Amino acid sequence: MKIAVVCDVLGEENNGTTVAAMNLIRFLRSRNHDVRVVCPDKDRQGEPGYYVVPRLNVGPLNDYVQKVGVSIAVSDQTVLENALHDVDIIHIMTPFILGKAALEYGRKHRIPVTAGFHAQAENITNHLHLMNSSVANGLTYKAMYLLVFQYVNAIHYPTQFIRDIFENEVGPTNGYVISNGVNSRFVRMDVERPAEWADKFVILFTGRYGLEKSHRVLIDAAAQSRYESRIQLVFAGTGPLHDELEAYGKKLTHPPVMQFYSRDEMLRVINSADLYVHPAEVEIEAIACLEAISCGLVPIIADSPRSATRFFALGENNLFHFNDPADLAAKIDYWIEHPREKEQCSREYQGYTRQFEQQHCMERMEQMLLETAASYSPL
């Protein structure tokens, strides 16, 4: 089958949407589908199967966009025509400029279109300082629906959580709930721990340096821990709040390590850590958390009602009250003081994450595309 995957955001695998897109692209190609990728990643120019469009120029905001760590695409009709003219189905990753243009092309040329739901309203309103406005978030969901999602033939939701939120705003949709999945290489293994971490209790959090990820809550919790002098925080990621978080973390005996890691490096970092904390207030799924617990790390997860990640908690000590550093500090101290219980919990999590095995999830994504193409009946 000829499949177009349209990515408003694609580049270095430093964000969940890009990771999800690349996992899908690699899998579909492994199944011998002809996959065309439309994206703004200029490093892919000339690579077979990639059709590169320009990046959005936002003038004085370009520096901010660069700090966020992603580049947004704009449409190019010639590129779209070359990529999409004979495909069997179009899958758009996000409902932005390029995705909307691909949708319009598909409707005009009677090609079925599916779309992924990889951005919560708060991921957008956060940049306008309106993350906690229910009105702004509701209007954002309605705009997504009116501009894109009402016209697609099927929607991929990574979790039932985000499907429920969206359908509560816009009504029922033709949706498939499919996890983005955890790659099979994320398993527990013995690695050589960095010498500078040898005598420390290492707590990992993987997430973009953005307001909704709540890094400061974890910094404050580490500061309140009875074991503050032993704790080494590791913030794997990039984002616009890098400098602010770096300055805020200097109050700790061991300031947070702040760095972007490749996928191979990330596997080694996870297996070098002692605990995983996910303080984010807003999260659709958090594959990063699943990757960590698949490697045997015990998680402590914020119980935010705006985060699907809270459903990964297996016990009360795997949850803390969101935006409550004191409660998080108490949970951190519990796991430091109870190593046997931590080891037992680790074994339980390694069994739990089998349901998110990427091969199975990608097979379901493939089935969604096949079913949608087979049942498509243009109006």
Image: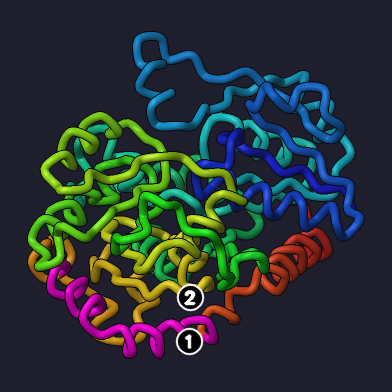
Up/down of 185 relative to 223, above or below: below
**Residue bearing mark 2:** 296
Callout 2: few (<14), some (14-19), or many (20+) C-alpha neighbours within 10 Å?
A: many
N-term-proximal mark, 1 vs 2: 2
Q: Quadrant of residue 243?
A: top left
Horizontal side of 111 relative to 12 (left or right) equals right
- Inspect this view and state whether residue 9 appears: yes
Stretch in magenta: 328-351
**Residue bearing mark 1:** 347
State the quadrant of the N terminus. bottom right
Q: Amino acid at mark 1?
A: Arg
> x%, y% of residue 145?
46, 49
Residue 342: in magenta span: yes
Residue 28: in magenta span: no
- Inspect this view and state whether residue 172 appears: no
Check contact, mark 1 vs mark 2: CB within 8 A. Answer: yes
Q: Amino acid at mark 2?
A: Gly
